[in-house]
Image: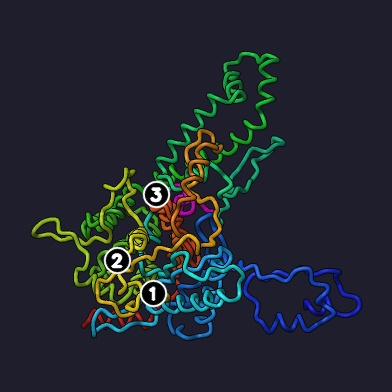
Amino acid sequence: MFLSDMSGRVPLYKKAFVFFSSPTPKELVTHIKNDTSVLPRIGALKEFNLEYFPIDSQGFITDNEKALEQLFGEDVENSQIYDACLNTMAMRIATMFASLREFPFVRYRASKSLDASTVTSFRELVPTKLAALVWNYLSKYKTTIPNFPQAETCELIILDRSVDQIAPVIHEWTYDAMCHDLLEMEGNKYVHEVPSKTGGAPEKKEVLLEDHDPIWLELRHAHIADASERLHDKMTNFISKNKAAQIQHGSRDGSELSTRDLQKMVQALPQYTEQMDKLSLHVEIAGKINRLIRELGLRDLGQLEQDLVFGDAGAKEVINFLRTNQDATPENKLRLLMIYSIVYPEKFEADKGVKLMQLAKLSPDDMKAVNNMRLLERQSDAKKASMGGFSLKFDAQKKKNAARKDRTGEEEAWQLSRFYPMIEEIIEKLSKGDLSKDDYSCMNDPSPTVHGGTRGASVRTTQIPAAHSIRSRRTATWARPRHSDDGCSSDSVLKNALNDFKNMGQRIFVFIIGGATRSELRVCHKLTTKLKREVILGSSSIDDPPQFISYWANFWLKNSLLEAQGRSQS
């Protein structure tokens, strides 16, 4: 079509400026070059390498929403859909590194058998295959892209959703996560009602909760209780400082406004209206979330979820909750049982899971979601769990499972904020060089023992000379001001943060196959500050709990079910 438009004596356009979002095959470029009538009419012919989709300043997706189904479903291995999904994902990840001029160490969660009785399944090989495809693309970039680094400048670690199956369904109590979990949002779009300018019925208005909103930027990763308090303080402070607000509130006692007062009010009105709209929006959202928390009884549910994860609750507490909270929504009861099944898998063997579902008054389709999520777990991990791989002993007679080590001593925590995604531990270990080489292999590690080192060996991050890094410097999210009274930026805070940013170490990229969560994105922002290394999260998609539940319910892993039953019997 391009040659058809631009060739001949009378082309459709005088000049053509052509930009490719991904690498272009050489034969196509040669085909264009061979048409001598077209060459003089080309104003630009460039590769942009922009096949990825940013979701915020430290997150991107490859837009493979069906990755769980296409890569981990039944009978998909080596199918066209399977290969196409992996190739598209790899190419889009690679273009992200091309656009940032970064060349990473490519690490991945390795497939391995715990012992002779466990066999590596094709699902466990997905990270390995994706890492190999990404590495192939990056290797070509070294010779085809101008100024592409010739030595490693950063770290990439590829994981799959089995690394943490609790994070997608547990209630995350930050402002951002609560917005997407409890409110009916489309992506980052929130729809609310505003008074009509003509005095008629309220009008619907769409707003985007994104980085351009300074209040959102400040509060998105705050606990909902903290966010609510800060919004109250902001509103109080705003009214006390803004002339238009003072006059408006002062006039409510019935006294008449002087001409001088009216003049001050008019002068302050544009700024007042803009800031008041922003504050009012977030006050409304926080109020709606807090109301839903009360109506749905989420505090008690959230406490039980976290107690399960940290080994402080078990069967007795779950059964008691289901019996005394019959009015809890089916989705919330299902999420609780999904967490319970991961922490206590033995409670779902044989017909035990069916009885729990009956107690919760959930359907057989809901049971599918629980089974499929459990079957996504790696066999080696499942075997470790069945052997008591991670449990906490509370007394001589009673032992409870725990899916997380308690880390609340590290920082001040709000109620229900103990939970953290597993990638937090993984990223910290990667930064320290403490990742096990048995669990996380590397495509381009200079060490000769990468794929066959002794058990317990660790991945040591290579310190890269600054001269080799051609990374684009930009303001990280943590470098933006956090505490402003009215949502406006503070120059002094920004300058200090930018000075810190100049001293940051190499970037860390984490890619999760099968969907990432809001809590995992939050952790990447948090660790950027803590580690002084910009941490960027990538995934096939970013999903909220209802989406994850739908995925797990809608694809059925029959073969894995048979495998799991066989393991259970053995």
Looking at the rendered structure, the kind of residue marked 1 is: Pro
Q: Is residue 266 left or right of residue 305?
A: right
Using the numbered discs, state the Cα–Cα distance from disc 3 to disc 2 in whole angstroms.
22 Å
> Which of label 3 and label 2 is nearer to you?
3
At numbered mark 1, what does the secondary structure look like: helix, strand or loop? loop
Residues shaded magenta: 175-185
Looking at the rendered structure, the kind of residue marked 3 is: Trp
Could you say which is closer to the camera, residue 320 or residue 314?
314
Q: Residue at x 46, y 83 (%)?
A: 76
- Classify 10 Å Cα crowding around label 1: few (below 14), some (14-19), many (20 and above): few
The percent coordinates of residue 210 (x first, y second) are 56, 50
Which label was assigned to residue 173? Answer: 3
The percent coordinates of residue 546 (x first, y second) are 45, 61
Determine which quarter of the picture holds residue 68: bottom left
Q: Which residue is mark 2?
A: 341
Instruction: Name the N-terminal-most of marks 2 and 1.
Output: 2
Q: Residue 80, relative to residue 397: is it above or below?
A: below
Does residue 268 appear in this view?
yes
